[in-house]
Image (cartoon, rainbow, N blue to C red):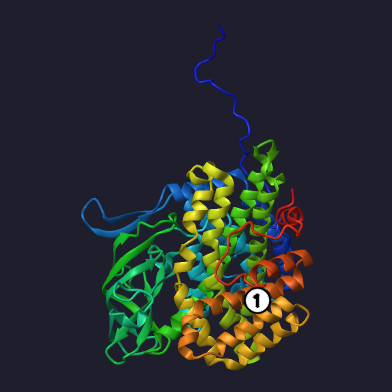
Amino acid sequence: MERHSFGQTHEVTNQVPPLADYNLFSSDAALTAALERDGAAWHRDALLRHGAALTTPETLALAELANRHTPELFTHSPRGERIDALEFHASWHTLLSLLRREGLHALPFSDPQRGAMVARCAGYFLHAQIESGSLCPLTMTFASIPVLQREPALFARLRDKLYAREHDPRDIPLTHKNSAMIGMGMTEKQGGSDVRSNQTRAYATAGRGRGAAYRLVGHKWFFSAPQCDAHLVLGRTDDHEGLSCFFVPRFAPDGSKNAVQIQRLKDKLGNRSNASSEVEFLDAFGIMIGDEGRGVPTIIEMANYTRLDCVIGSAALMRAALVQAIHHARHRSAFGRHLADQPLMRNVLADLALESEAATVLFMRLARAFEESADAASTSLAERAWRRIVTPAAKYWVCKRALEFTGEAMEVWGGNGYVETGPMARFYREAPVNSIWEGSGNVMCLDVLRAMEREPDAAQALFAGWQMEAQAHPALSAALGKLAAALNGPAEHREASARRIAQQVVLIAQATLLLEHAPGEVAEAFIATRLADGCGESGRVYGTLPAAFDHAAIVERAFPA
């Protein structure tokens, strides 16, 4: 009788090895090309180094640990004192140290030069492929800098700590810290995206208006990263009907904990490594920034930057899921062949690759627009349109596509993709947050219409540039014509069609960029399946590319074997 040792019933075969020790940057042809053409080639070596460091088994383990060991809130000390302390796993702080070391929290402001915004966005894209939650406080810190720069006295005290490339996890007054992180709190229970319904009150304590001290009474329903050293929040004064913006530090000027009580941490679907909270202000100390009653425009400048990071974060989830799917298909066999050698699976992977490349070239183009429009006086109308019109459209469309994309990539893995021991389930749970955060889909689409109505000259310059690209391409030209017709309809019809309009804005933008910068077959396949008659109008399933295209070549370009 044949005997078997305990536990050995079979040989493990046809399982895919973990994907590690590859370079996130050098393996991405679309990203490397965009870095060169948009003036950031000087940052190439840093991205090569960073792209390799992020895929070591040790760094990949940090992402898994930070999401498994989620933050904990301790409202009181053992003696009953109110402390509102947050405890994170050590992996979280290591991830934040990696981010700050690369300057991704401040690079265009701390080291201004041509291509700095592009370089920063490329680095952010690399990190977002590994772990998303650690990006939240980094994004808000980055986006707060141009707002705080408008407050010279306050910014002078914060500048070195905001620009520092050291992560300082200590929960102590900012005056004693080596670096700072800034958060944001806008929404309240009754309003959500309708921040004009906010009820938080601000009462002057020393002077009034910009730069003066106030005490805040109220609440925030979503208070992002409560461990940050300060937050920008909205409140209403007695002297003005409009909302004002306030800088609310974690510690009051006398060194005591500011009266911002954390009620609880949100139990979120994804983004689990990051702490999001509900808070109440009990006479919390704050300094008004911006003009009184102009809080929404003040904080919206911050939101414009965070919206770009939402686009990048969703594009990164696509890229990460795509690479994992291709790697799996190249190593897993079924029905006598590797999955990657089977025509229908190649179609799915190639279609995903098109979507991913289109998202990448789009966010890199937006990064250039943000850089070139930083100086309002010298900004061209076209660059302003890319930043003001295309950004909210991209925030809507790319973030929406990430949900379907990560689900399809998970399906490539089959049952192994659905369990939490691999990265695909985390990608899938992470995908919805960027679509919701900083303005949900409807808010973004209405913002696209509002931007076009308020800046018709910029919209016209944008369309004129696209028409030049579309002259030699009938499908793209026809799509532009349909978009123009939709925009010329009655106002009520435009609002009802705002999602379709925003979708078409993005697809046309992506198509023109691919025509200019990608291989011909990539651009043609994208246009044929997103903008030709009957395509790109109401959503589509991945894996429906015409057989005439070279699916294998598209997959190889996306992630070389």
* Residue 224 appears left or right of 486: left
Quadrant where the N terminus sits is: top right
Q: Nearer the viewer, residue 409 or 149?
A: 409
**Residue at which label 1 appears:** 509
Q: Amino acid at mark 1?
A: Ala
The outermost residue toward the front is 534
State left or right for residue 156 relative to residue 540.
Answer: left
For the point 52% across and 42% down, the residue is: 415
x, y percent for residue 143? 51, 74
Q: Residues within 10 Å of mark 1 (few under 14, many from 20)?
A: many
Q: Quadrant of residue 457?
A: bottom right
Q: Position of residue 327 (x, y in %)?
A: 66, 46
- Say which of 15 and 24 sits in front: 15
The answer to whether residue 181 is visible is no
Q: With respect to residue 88, does 148 lie above or below?
A: below
Residue at left offset 74%, top offset 68%: 524
Q: Quadrant of residue 353?
A: bottom right
**Residue 289 picture location, percent across and down:** 41, 83
At 71% across and 60% down in the image, what residue appears? 546
Can residue 30 be seen here? The reply is yes
Name above or below for residue 120 compared with residue 498.
Answer: above
User: Which residue is at a point 28% across and 86% down the rendered structure image?
Assistant: 204
Instruction: Label 1, secondary structure: give it.
Output: helix
